[in-house]
Amino acid sequence: MTVAELFGGELMNTLALIAIAVAALYFARAPMRGLIASMCRAIAQGLRFASQSLIDARTNLTARNREVLLAAGRDAAARMVEREFERFGDTVRRDLGQYPSLHQALAERATNLDNDYAESTATPPAPPGWAEAVEAVAAVPAKADPVLRQVLESIHGSFKDAADEASDDYRKDCRTRHKHLNDMAPSWREALKLLSEVKSRLETTNARAASVDQHMKKYEEISADTDRAAASLQSSALVQFFIAGLVLIVAAGGAVVNFHLIARPMSEMVGGNAYVGAFQMADIAALVIILVELSMGLFVMECLRITNLFPAVSALPDHVRQKLAITAFGLLFSLACVEAGLAYMRELLLQDELATAALLRGDGIAAGTSFLWITTAAQMGMGFILPFALTFVAIPLETFVHSLRAVLGWAAAGLLLTTSFMLRLLAQGFDEGAAVLAQLYDVVIFAPLWVEKRLTGAGDSEAKAAHRKTAPVGAKAMMQDVEERLAS
C-alpha cells in the first residue's frame, strides 16, 4: 500500500466521520437550538438575579451606612451640645455670678450721684426780714435833721454790711455746689465703667448662647434624619478621614525616627545576636517600648476624656480616672526618661565606634569633640520629647477609626454597584449570545440546511403549480397567479 493510498484512506475515513457528525448535528438541530437558548436564558436569568441581589445588598448597605453615620453624628453633636452647655454654665457663673455685686455697686453710685445732685441745686437766698423796715424808713420825709441823717447813715451802713454778708454766703454756697458737681465726675466714670463691664459680660453670654443654639440646631437636624444632614456628615467624614490619615502618616514617621533612635542601644542591652524568627530581639524590644508609650498616651487621653475610644474608661468614677491618668502619665514619663538614656548611650556607642575605626586606620584618637554635647543633648531631647508627642496620636486615631467605617461602607457600596453592572452586562451578552451560537451551529451544518432549503423550495413550486391547474379560471384567479409568479 502506497503512502497516497494510506493518506487517501484516512482522508476518506475523516470525511466520513465529518459527514456523520454533520448529519447527526443536522438531525439534532431543533433540540440543540432549544438547548442553547435554554442554557443562555438560564445563565442570563441567574446573572440578573445575582445583579439584583447585589443591588438589594447595596441598598441595605447604603441604608445601614446612613444609619451608622447619622448615629455617629448624633453622638458627636450630643457631646458638643453637652460641652457647650458646660461652657455656657461656666460663662454664666463667671460673668453673671458677680452681677449682684455689680448691681449693688451701680446702686451705690446712683445714690451718690443723686445725693450730690440734690446738694448741688441752687437755693435762692431768703428775703431779708427787714425789708418792711426799709420801706418804712424810706417813707420818712427827708429833713435836714442831723440825728435823722445819722440814723439813716447808720441804717445804710448796716444794709451794706448785710449785703456783703449775703454775697459771701452766696459765693460759699456756689463753691459748695461746684464741689459736689466735681465729686460727681468720678462716680459717673465708675458707673460707666461698670455698665461697660456688664455689657461685655452680657455680650459674651449671648455669644455662648448663640453657639449653643447652633449646635442644638445641628443636633435637631441630624435627629430629624434629613438628607442635608446626611450629605454634610458624609462630606465631613471624608475630610476627617483624609486629614486624620495624613496626621497618622506623619506620626508613623515620628515613630520610625524614635525606633531608630533606640534600636541600636537596645541591641547592647538584649544582645544583637538574639533572634525571634526572622527579626532581631533588639528591634522587637524597641518596638514594644514604642507601643507601650503609645498605649500609655492613649490611656492618658482617655482618662482626660479628650478621646472616647474605650467607653469603659469614660464610665469610671472621677477619682479612679484621676488615679489611672496619674499612673499612665508616670509610666509614660519613666519610659521617656529611659529613651533619653538610650539616646545618650547611642551617642556614646557611636563615638566609641568612630574612635576604634580611627585607631585601626592609625590616625590616633580623633580630636575636635568640643561640640559633642550638642548632638548628645539633641538626641536626648528627641528621645524624651517624642513619646509625649506621640501621645497626641490618640486624637487623629479616634477620628480615623470613626470615619473609616463610613469610608469602607461607601467603598463596598461602590464595589457592589460596579459588580452588579458587570453581571447585568454579562447577562445581556448571554441573551444576545444565544442567537449568535444558533447561527454558528447553522454554519457548521450549512450543507444539509442548503439541501433542505432546495428540496423545500422545489416542493413548494410543485404545490403552487398544482394549485394553479386546479384553480378556477377568472380575473381574480389570474391576478393571484400573477402575484404568486412575481413573488416567486
Image (cartoon, rainbow, N blue to C red):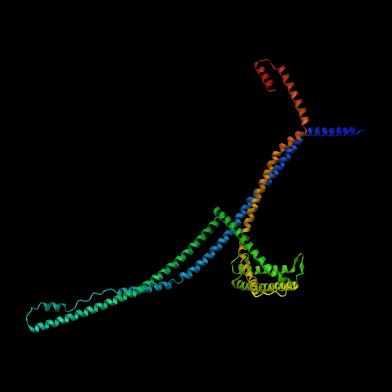
- Could you say where residue 2 lies in the image, as x and y percent from the top left? 91, 33
Q: Residue at x 73, y 69 (%)?
A: 282
In the rendered image, which quarter is residue 303 located in? Answer: bottom right
- Could you say where residue 42 lies in the image, as x and y percent from the top left? 72, 42
Q: Name the residue furthest top.
A: 473
| Residue closer to the observer: 308 or 276 | 276
| Residue closer to the observer: 401 or 365 | 365
Q: How many marks?
A: 0
Q: Name the residue furthest left.
A: 144
| Residue closer to the observer: 357 or 320 | 357
- Could you say where residue 45 lies in the image, as x and y percent from the top left? 69, 43
Image quadrant holding the C terminus, namely: top right
- Could you say where residue 1 lies in the image, as x and y percent from the top left? 93, 33
| Residue closer to the observer: 315 or 17 | 17
The reply to whether residue 67 is visible in this rendering is: yes
Question: Is 309 positioned to the left or the right of 143 in the image?
Answer: right
Vertical comparison of 77 with 2: above or below? below
